[in-house]
Image: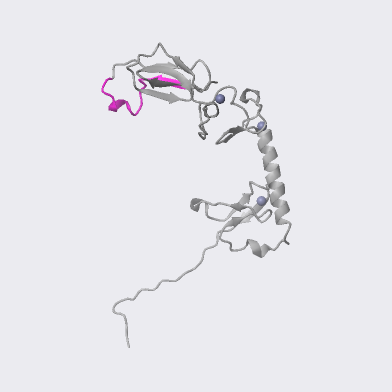
Amino acid sequence: MDKNTKILIPEIPGEWTQRQRNGSLNVWNGADHHRFHRTTTDLPEVSLRPPENGLYAERIDGAWYWVSGCAKCNGTGEKYSYSVCDKHNVCRLCSTHRSKLTETPWGHPDGFTCKPCQDAEDAVAKSEALTKVAETDYDEWDYRSQDECKCPHCATVIHIEAEDYGDKKMTCDTCGGEFALVTEYTIQFTTTVIGERLTA
Ligand SMILES: [Zn+2]
Ligand SMILES: [Zn+2]
Ligand SMILES: [Zn+2]
């Protein structure tokens, strides 16, 4: 797609200014939480899909045009772009088109990763972690009372949110190994004087 694409949208009056995007759908005068900010409420709601994937509606010099929103065509480097042209709607690693996928892909800042590519990447990460941890002899004390939750199979550090603290069975995302997590608490003591502090 040409990043300079600019196709007039004759259906939409140039004086309309309120447009929302809902996936590839462009909605003018749509009802939403912005409604009460509007001064005119008698405009009809109109929804249009672009003539081609990767385009979205933009108001330029008082008229509405379909313009390119594809981060790759435009070279903007925008992450998690949700306006992608057909040419660039492909796996970031093997370039398989989204329409050819048989399994749900994984989202990625630069588009998506197809399931087979993600599985291959995961296998490499697992093998690297297990190879690295094998460089030193296993000592269970290396996994006791640590500052971080560390998988005892592959030593990958797993971030635990405070609300997930507790004792539980876990499965490592990197190596698939199972382990038991115990959240250890450190006991500390605080003292404050009752009454007057005694002195010599
Ligand atoms: Zn593109
Ligand atoms: Zn792929
Ligand atoms: Zn692991």
Q: Position of residue 176 (x, y in %)?
A: 67, 47
Instruction: Return the x and y of residue 119 as percentages of the image width and height.
Output: 68, 38
* Identity of the residue furthest to the top in this view: 10
Give the image quarter of residue 44: top left
Dividing the picture into quarters, in which one does residue 1 lie? top right
Q: Residue furthest front?
A: 4
Residue at the location (62% across, 50% down)?
170
Nearest to the observer: residue 74 or residue 40: 74
**Residue shown at 72% from the left, 47% from the top:** 127
- Can you see residue 7? yes
> Which of the image's four quarters has the C terminus?
bottom left
Q: Is residue 33 magenta?
A: yes
* Position in image of residue 111 (x %, y %): 57, 32
Q: How is the image coloured?
A: one colour
Report the side of 168 relative to 119 (left or right).
left
Q: Residue at x 67, y 35 (%)?
A: 117
Number of numbered discs: 0
129 lies above or below 145: above
Q: Tell which residue pokes out farthest to the left in this image.
A: 39
| Residue 49 visible in image | no
Start and end of the magenta stretch? 25-40
Q: Nearer the viewer, residue 132 or 78?
A: 78
Magenta span contains residue 73: no
Left or right: 117 with respect to 55?
right
Q: Position of residue 104 (x, y in %)?
A: 62, 30
